[in-house]
Every structure is written in C-alpha cells, then in structure tokens.
Amino acid sequence: MSKTATLEIDGNRYEFPIIEGTENELGIDIKALRGVTNGVTTIDPGYKNTGSCESAITFLDGEKGILRYRGYSIEELAEKADFLEVAYLLIFGELPTAVQLEKFDKDIKEESHVDEDMKKILDGFPKSAHPMGVLSSLTSALIAFNPGSVDVDSEEEMYNAIVKILAKFPVLAAWTMRKRKSLPLDYGDSSLGYVENLHKMMFARPNKTYEPNKLVYDALDKLLILHADHEQNCSTSTVRIVGSSHAGLFASLSAGISALWGPLHGGANQAVIEMLEAIKADGGDTAKYINKAKDKNDPFRLMGFGHRVYKNFDPRAKIIKKSAEEVLGDLGIEDPVLDIAKGLSSVALEDEYFVQRKLYPNVDFYSGIIYRALGIPTEMFTVMFALGRLPGWIAQWREMRLRKEPIGRPRQIYIGENHRTFKTVSER
Ligand code: ACO
C-alpha cells in the first residue's frame, strides 16, 4: 500500500503522497501543498530537510558512511577504475565498454585545445588573482568561443558539448597555475592519458625534460575519482538551478565553480592546510585549537571536520587518509603537517563536543596533504577539486535537463515592513 503523510493546519487535514527511493529513502511529496492549502509554504533555510530532485546518479547514506556512484561503491571505484571511466559512468549511467571508452578518450583528445584568444583574457588577470576566480571566468568565457546553445534533445549535441568541456577544462585549470608561476601556456600532449596529460600541462617546464611518474598519476587519479560527485551539495545544486533556467552547460558550470570556492565547501581543502600550518607555526599545540573550535565565542572552526550529510566517517576521508600515508611514504616525504592532522583528528574523535555533534573528518581533511606532496600549490587545491567534480556537475546538469525539470525558484516567508506610503526626501 502506498504511504501518505497527513498535515493538519487550523483543523483542516491534508494528505500528501510519500515517495520511496530505490534505497528505501522516504520523501513527502508536497508539490500540491500551496494549491490545496491556499498558499501555505514550507521553510527550510539551507535545505536541511528538503529534497530538490529525484536523481539516479549518486547514493549516499550519511549515517552509515556509504557513497556510491550509479550503484558502485566509492571504495571499489577508487581501487579499480580510472577517472575517465568514472566520468563516463557518472554522466551516461553505465561503465563504458572498451570501444566506448576508447572513443570517449579519442573525442576528448580531439577537443583538447582552446581558442588562442582565450590567452588574452587570461592575460587580463593580475598574477595574484585566485585561481578559482580565474577558472570560473575562463569557463564562462568559453561560451563566447562556443556560442551554439545545446539542443538537449539531441544526444549528439549533448555528447559533443560534454566532450568539449571535459577536454578544455584541464587546459584552463593548468593555465591558471602556469599564469601564477609565469610559465608559458601549454596544450599538453594528446598521446598521454587524461590525468597524465593534466599533470604534464601543470608541471612541464620549458627548459627541463618532463619526467612521468606513475605513483603521482595514480594518487591524482584516485583523488579526482573521490571528488567526482556528491549528490545535491552546494555547487551541484548551483549548477542544476542555473541550468534550470536553460542557461547553457558552460555558464552553469562556471556558477558551480564559484559556489565550490567558498571555505565551507570546496575551499575547505585550502583552509585545512592553512589551519595546519598555523598550528605548526604556533608550536603544534593541537589541544589549544580543539578548545578554540569548541568555544562558541571564538569564530574558529576545525576546518575539514563536519559535514552536512555525513554523521559518520566520510568514506572518502578514510581512503584519502590511507592514500596520504602511502603517497608520502612512497615519495619519501616527511610532512609534520600530516602528524598534526592525525593528532587533531584522534583528539577530536574522542572529544565529547565532536562526538555529540557527530563531527568526523571530511574529504578535505587529508586531500591537501597529498596535493602538497605532489607539489601542487595551496591556492590550486580547490581547482583540483573542481577538476574532479566536473563529471558530477555535468551528469547532474544532463539529468536535470533530460528530466525536463522546471526552473528552480524557491518560495520565502516575507518578514519585512507592511505596506507604507512613500515620503519625499524633504519629508524624511
Ligand atoms: N568545528 C567546530 N564545530 C563545528 C564544526 C567544525 N568544523 N562543524 C560544525 N560544528 C558545530 C557547530 O558549531 C554546531 O554546533 P551547535 O549545535 O552547538 O551550534 C554543530 O556542530 C552543527 O553545525 P552546523 O554548522 O549547523 O552544521 P552544517 O551541516 O550546517 O554545516 C559544515 C556543515 C558547513 C561542513 C560545517 O561542519 C563546517 O563548517 N565545517 C568546516 C568546513 C569544512 O570542512 N567544509 C567542507 C565540507 S565537505 C565539502 O564541502 C567537500
């Protein structure tokens, strides 16, 4: 029998259907609420209890610490798949066959150049500009060089737009770093794989032979996979809502990059390293910072801790912690900041304040330590996150358009002045 929920307002009872997801999640379908109640709405700032869509892409259970892309566990994908396969899986719903993967790879390589005039736009930014701001602007600028809007009913057009952005985005991301370092802009090498090419575009020097390093590639590949999607988070919801006005894919992605930049979202990976460095410079006293985080009169928060959805260990953090230890070990790097991170996390995991609020390390707590070991500058950390999240944003945008979702337009409860009459300046 189908389930329903009953709501009573001023003695009137209303019934609403309950929909059930494939993992038995229940949601009260309030689509008819305003109509049947004559204008009553719901209020849920930050959407802590509000489902914005039905989606078949990513499942996560924050209580149990489960994350799956299209049904495959993140642990298995991180171990066995490569980033391009995961991108294909997220976007098109199934793991690619060998033929599909080869074509996908070839099509991306075919598009992995950007218009030379994009360099003039990049040139206009000061070197000090944050790479996330530059990346968002350059992604938006791509629209000017690819003006045709995508006919989402045409599978071919959709595919071409997706391949284009997957190809050009790493070039733009690498350029933001090269610009800051005053290195010549590079188009990479299409004989290399996606992640290898990204690394070469970021690190190749004009006067030095580029040395490939499988260890580094594997670590990077894993990090990108772990960041590839996370259902309706802040940046993904932004991409979906911007796209719901039928703004194009590149415009929607550019908005998503801006949303990701904030320190409460993707910007946390940069904030974590800055915090760990500050603790190190202050003598490594982790207890002092745990106390600061607990003090309600102190704005300090333990960056990389807590999550809107995970009330258990973030499964990605578990994989990244292990990977951070391996990468540092394999590369022979000793980073005191890793010890501070481990110390902070072991104290916090035992502390009443964190235990009660179910605050666990999130994906960003350890990722910065690996990025640092790979020689990636701190201000590029969130760009690395964006590179990983790109297939997720694309998949969510595509799903939203294919499901013909209506334009996103929340309601509000007005709490301002009631009607009043205008006074001229001399009357005020
Ligand atoms: N340090 C100290 N206290 C914290 C932290 C933290 N990192 N996170 C949450 N709390 C406390 C809050 O003060 C609040 O306490 P209270 O109930 O006594 O008022 C309680 O835990 C609940 O916190 P909220 O802010 O209400 O939780 P919300 O779900 O809104 O926020 C968020 C989640 C933004 C991730 C938060 O935990 C945070 O700011 N973390 C640090 C930033 C961070 O690491 N962000 C990355 C998230 S992962 C990602 O985006 C990829």
Image (cartoon, rainbow, N blue to C red):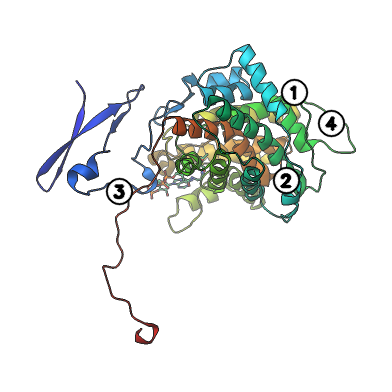
Query: Splitting the image into 4 quarters, where does residue 211 fall?
Result: top right
Q: Which residue is mark 2?
A: 118
Q: Is residue 371 left or right of residue 4?
A: right
Disc 4 to disc 2, C-alpha distance = 25 Å
Badge 2 vs badge 1, beta-carbon distance below 8 Å: no
Bin the neighbour count of mark 4 within 10 Å (Cα to Cα): few under 14, some 14-19, many 20 and up: few
The residue at 32%/23% (across/down) is 24
Q: Secondary structure at mark 4?
A: loop
Q: Which residue is mark 1?
A: 214
Query: Which mark is in front, 1 or 3?
Result: 3
Disc 3 to disc 4, C-alpha distance = 55 Å
Disc 1 to disc 3, C-alpha distance = 50 Å
Q: What amino acid does circle 2 point to?
A: Met
Task: Please tell me which of labels 2 and 1 falls first in the chain.
Answer: 2
- Residue 75, how many percent across, how many down? 54, 21
- Residue 37, how many percent across, how many down? 18, 45
Q: Secondary structure at mark 2?
A: helix
Task: Please tell me which of labels 3 and 4 falls first in the chain.
Answer: 3
Disc 4 to disc 1, C-alpha distance = 13 Å
Task: Please tell me which of labels 1 and 3 falls first in the chain.
Answer: 3
Badge 4 vs badge 1, beta-carbon distance below 8 Å: no
Query: Which mark is in front, 4 or 1?
Result: 4
Q: Which residue is mark 3?
A: 43
Quarter the C terminus occupies = bottom left
Badge 3 vs badge 2, beta-carbon distance below 8 Å: no
Q: What amino acid does circle 4 point to?
A: Tyr
Does residue 230 appear in the picture of this structure? no
The residue at 48%/22% (across/down) is 70
Disc 3 to disc 2, C-alpha distance = 43 Å
Q: Is residue 426 left or right of residue 9?
A: right
